[in-house]
Amino acid sequence: DQQVKQNSPSLSVQEGRISILNCDYTNSMFDYFLWYKKYPAEGPTFLISISSIKDKNEDGRFTVFLNKSAKHLSLHIVPSQPGDSAVYFCAASAETSGSRLTFGEGTQLTVNP
Amino acid sequence: EAGVAQSPRYKIIEKRQSVAFWCNPISGHATLYWYQQILGQGPKLLIQFQNNGVVDDSQLPKDRFSAERLKGVDSTLKIQPAKLEDSAVYLCASSTLGWGNYGYTFGSGTRLTVV
């Protein structure tokens, strides 16, 4: 039962343009969402998060949007830079499950110079 | 602050052998997690400790996997005997009790190959 899904295994964009990574979830108990970035041979690193009481959170070039009715969130990176090339994981947690994070499969973002 | 330390970085073993991974979390982090990441998939929680007690091990294959966190600091994860499908990256992470807006801090992982 895949409760968090990232349907795009890969995404390629040009430097300076917008990158949009998408994530869908099925568990209506999820109330906190996070994005992690992972470089090869490294562990995932926290990028940005959003609570279910908000619909948008912004941190520099990164913005996460949450659409609860559609059970969908997206990560926007503007402008994209070659150093952003990495695997991006969407993750979700539910207060009823403590601090367990449920991850999506990841999207490989490639930003071309 | 020092990050989450894991060793070894890589391990190759034959099926039916045993293997152990070690993790040293960030100092002061009460909660420690072991995740399994199979190639092409997202990380999946195996076990969560709070101090030296188990909080969640519902997804740990207990017939072959075991983990302990003695003295509420370092932790070891063991697989005995290993199967081919155990080939994965094993990630350790730690967090404070209330991890707020920042999630966990992950280590670099141990890549296990079972042949």
Image: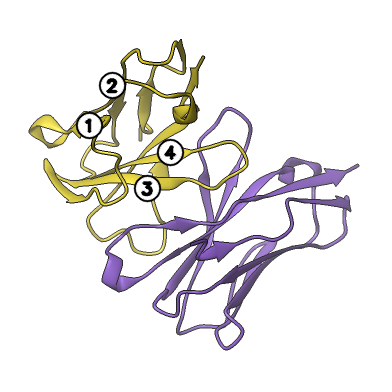
Is disc 3 in the same subunit as disc 1?
Answer: yes
The residue at which mark 4 appears reads as B36
Amino acid on which the number 1 mark rests in the picture? Ser
Compared to residue B102, the image places residue B111 above or below, namely above
The residue at which mark 3 appears reads as B45
> Callout 4 environment at 10 Å: few (<14), some (14 to 19), or many (20+)?
many
Amino acid on which the number 2 mark rests in the picture? Gln
> Callout 3 environment at 10 Å: few (<14), some (14 to 19), or many (20+)?
many
Looking at the image, tell me whether mark 1 or mark 4 is earlier in sequence order: 4
Q: Secondary structure at mark 2?
A: loop
Q: Which chain is yellow?
A: B
In the picture provided, is A106 more to the left or to the right than B13?
right
In the drawing, what numbered circle is on residue B66? Answer: 1
Q: Secondary structure at mark 1?
A: strand
Q: CA distance from mark 2 to mark 3?
A: 19 Å
Would you say the residues marked 1 and 2 are in contact, meaning their CB atoms lie under 8 Å apart?
A: yes
Q: CA distance from mark 3 to mark 1?
A: 13 Å
Looking at the image, tell me whether mark 2 or mark 3 is earlier in sequence order: 3
